[in-house]
């Protein structure tokens, strides 16, 4: 049945007298059928080249199809330039974009990979998988402002009703975690005095979204910590009083819960909820020690500067490159005790190169 349909479409696109719009439409259908089988790769590329002339409004879509084909054929030298020439704003087929971002990452096109994920959230706003990958990549790249903007867009959009309660709660926590990452970078940057206003803005944003204030003692402690660093003792003491009030409410609630459960409570005994302040990154500090830090003179502490990084690995430097014979791909690498590398390519050819210079 499919072979018969392909023959019919070939006759239509190769015939004469058909309006160009109808011919382009038929050719698109033919391409979609042919590209399922790599045997037709050359024919598909020919049709795509013709479509770029017949239907110039979709030229980026046709380049994307070509780029995907070259990537599947292990031709990054041809795929990368095509991917780079694509205008994602003109792509309307979510299926065509799905699965493209790993290809782009492998080719080193990080910004384009991120743009492709964002485009998918626009084309299919109900696709939680698209949102998870987009937000996850923003977090990995340390682009916290964009991450928070994306989460707010998802939580405040018309499609929020399609999210489960667990998804909404998870996104809210991701938003709070993002604010903490930005705060912690400022605290360790050595620029806290100049950027204290940013910290307070983040803390205000967190307070406005707290699902359960008693679970976020770190917010009040951080505010008091920064005020103490700035030497604003009166404001610091007020923040400490707020922290103490939250701790007392938490303690009273724990006692009430214990009594309701018939477990009783020992007067003056520290309850688990009182003992530590937990931060979003998993670190925790005893409440006693945390309050002690707030009493230290600001000059006793010197922030440790963080190293700026591009992604999780920091800035990388390429010292040499190696190309296998006949354009084959290197598929396996092993290091020898002396520092040399053993490389095997996709043709099963083995090479021994210097780990320092890359020479054979």
Image: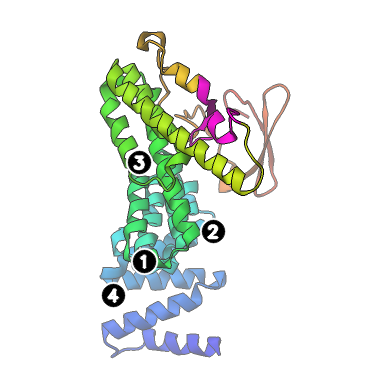
Label disc, if present, on residue 184 of the rendered structure: none
Q: SS for tag 4?
A: helix
- Number of other residues with Cα within 10 Å of mark 1, as a class: few under 14, some 14 to 19, many 20 or more: few
Residue closer to the observer: 353 or 176 = 176
Instruction: Specify how the rendered protein is coloured.
Output: rainbow
- Mark 4 in CB contact with mark 2 (< 8 angstroms): no
- Mark 1 in CB contact with mark 3 (< 8 angstroms): no
Quadrant location of the C terminus?
A: top right
Q: Earlier in the sequence, mark 3 or mark 2?
A: 2
Label 1 vs label 3: CA separation?
A: 25 Å
Q: SS for tag 2?
A: loop
Q: Is residue 216 above or below residue 44?
A: above
**Of the residues tagged 2 and 1, which is closer to the observer?**
1
Q: Which residue is found at the position 41% from the left and 30% from the top?
A: 243
Tell me, yes or no, whether the highlighted magenta stretch contains residue 184: no
Q: SS for tag 3?
A: helix
Q: Earlier in the sequence, mark 3 or mark 4?
A: 4
**Of the residues tagged 1 and 4, which is closer to the observer?**
1
**Of the residues tagged 3 and 2, which is closer to the observer?**
3
- Mark 3 in CB contact with mark 2 (< 8 angstroms): no
Q: Earlier in the sequence, mark 2 or mark 1?
A: 2
Tell me, yes or no, whether the highlighted magenta stretch contains residue 277: yes
Whole-percent x, y for residue 26 in the image = 37, 83
Q: Which residue is found at the position 35% from the left and 18% from the top?
A: 190
Q: Which residue is found at the position 63% from the left and 26% from the top?
A: 354
**Of the residues tagged 1 and 3, which is closer to the observer?**
3
Which contiguous range is marked in magenta?
A: 267-288
Q: Which residue is mark 3?
A: 207
């Amino acid at each position: 049945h499919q072979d018969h349909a392909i023959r019919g479409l070939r006759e239509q696109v190769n015939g004469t007298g058909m309006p160009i719009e109808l011919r382009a439409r038929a050719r698109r259908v033919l391409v979609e059928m042919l590209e399922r089988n790599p045997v037709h790769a050359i024919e598909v590329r020919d049709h795509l080249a013709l479509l770029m002339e017949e239907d110039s409004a979709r030229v980026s879509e046709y380049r994307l199809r070509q780029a995907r084909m070259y990537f599947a054929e292990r031709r990054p030298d041809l795929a990368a330039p095509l991917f780079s020439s694509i205008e994602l704003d003109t792509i309307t087929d979510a299926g065509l974009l799905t699965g493209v971002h790993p290809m782009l990452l492998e080719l080193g096109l990080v910004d384009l990979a991120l743009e492709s994920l964002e485009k998918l959230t626009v084309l299919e706003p109900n696709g939680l998988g698209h949102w998870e990958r987009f937000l996850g990549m923003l977090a990995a790249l340390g682009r916290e402002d964009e991450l928070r903007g994306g989460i707010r867009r998802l939580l405040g959009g018309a499609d929020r009703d399609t999210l489960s309660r667990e998804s909404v709660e998870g996104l809210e926590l991701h938003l709070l975690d993002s604010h903490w990452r930005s705060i912690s970078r400022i605290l360790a940057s050595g620029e806290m005095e100049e950027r204290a206003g940013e910290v307070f803005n983040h803390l205000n944003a967190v307070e406005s979204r707290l699902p359960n204030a008693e679970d976020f003692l770190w917010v009040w402690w951080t505010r008091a910590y920064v005020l103490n660093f700035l030497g604003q003792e009166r404001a610091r003491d007020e923040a400490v009083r707020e922290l103490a009030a939250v701790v007392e409410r938490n303690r009273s609630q724990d006692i009430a819960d214990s009594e309701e459960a018939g477990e009783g409570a020992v007067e003056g005994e520290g309850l688990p909820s009182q003992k530590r302040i937990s931060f979003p990154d998993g670190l925790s500090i005893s409440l006693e020690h945390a309050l002690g830090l707030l009493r230290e003179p600001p000059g006793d502490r010197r922030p440790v500067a963080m190293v700026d990084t591009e992604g999780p690995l920091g800035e990388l430097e390429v010292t040499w490159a190696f190309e296998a014979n006949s354009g084959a791909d290197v598929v396996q690498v092993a290091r020898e005790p002396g520092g040399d590398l053993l490389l095997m390519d996709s043709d099963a050819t083995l090479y021994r190169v210097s780990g320092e210079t890359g020479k054979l």
